[in-house]
Amino acid sequence: MPDYLITWIHLAAAIALIGGLIFSQFVLAPAARDLASDSKAREVVRLAGRRFRTISWVSLIILILTGAYQMLNESGAARIETTWGVVLMLKLFLFVIAFGLLLIHDFIIDPYAPLSKDASPASVSPTISARADTLQKAVIVMTLAVLLVASYLAKI
């Protein structure tokens, strides 16, 4: 497969992940908060979150696979002794932090878990919602930091 196609797939996965996170955090969630008394709005956010979780994890897997391919194709430039290699390690470190935060958000806190039959959407703990919100903002910051480092990496 041509290198430019691998790069395009890598960028498309990053766009899907970061764009979805930003939309969810700054458009969907505030719109639902404005309709705080409407349980249907909270249910829409929960269902959208569950659907986006699949997209985000597929995007992450694509990012890992295409990133590994690109790193292995760099020949000796990816060595830690070079400036390029050091900046790449910073990018990978930031990515691992974002990955870990998203893992905690989606599978430990799990704000989009199906509700039990006797629970209402309004019964979701505000503490869990606040933690999930904070974690999602941290993931956005980390992924944007990865983009910043990646753009610097492209100029080296």
Image: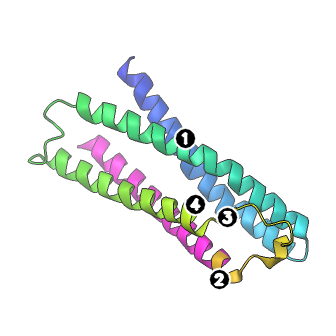
Per the image, the residue denoted by label 3 is 26
- Nearest to the eye among marks 4 and 3: give it: 4
Image location of residue 32, percent across then percent down: 81, 68
Q: Earlier in the sequence, mark 4 or mark 3?
A: 3
Q: Residues within 10 Å of mark 3 (few under 14, many from 20)?
A: few
For badge 3, the amino acid type reads Phe
Q: Main secondary structure of the magenta part?
A: helix
Q: Which residue sits at x=44%, y=23%?
A: 5
Residue situated in front as seen by the camera: 54 or 156: 54
Q: Earlier in the sequence, mark 4 or mark 1?
A: 1
For badge 4, the amino acid type reads Asp
Report how many numbered discs are placed on residues in the image.
4
Image location of residue 33, percent across then percent down: 79, 73
Per the image, the residue denoted by label 2 is 127
Q: Is residue 17 left or right of residue 71?
A: right
* Alpha carbon separation for disc pair 1 and 3: 22 Å
For badge 2, the amino acid type reads Thr
Labels 4 and 2 touching (C-beta < 8 A) = no
Image-quadrant location for residue 108: bottom right
Magenta stretch: give its range.
129-156
* Alpha carbon separation for disc pair 4 and 2: 15 Å
Residue 138 part of the magenta-drawn span: yes
Per the image, the residue denoted by label 1 is 58
Labels 4 and 3 touching (C-beta < 8 A) = no
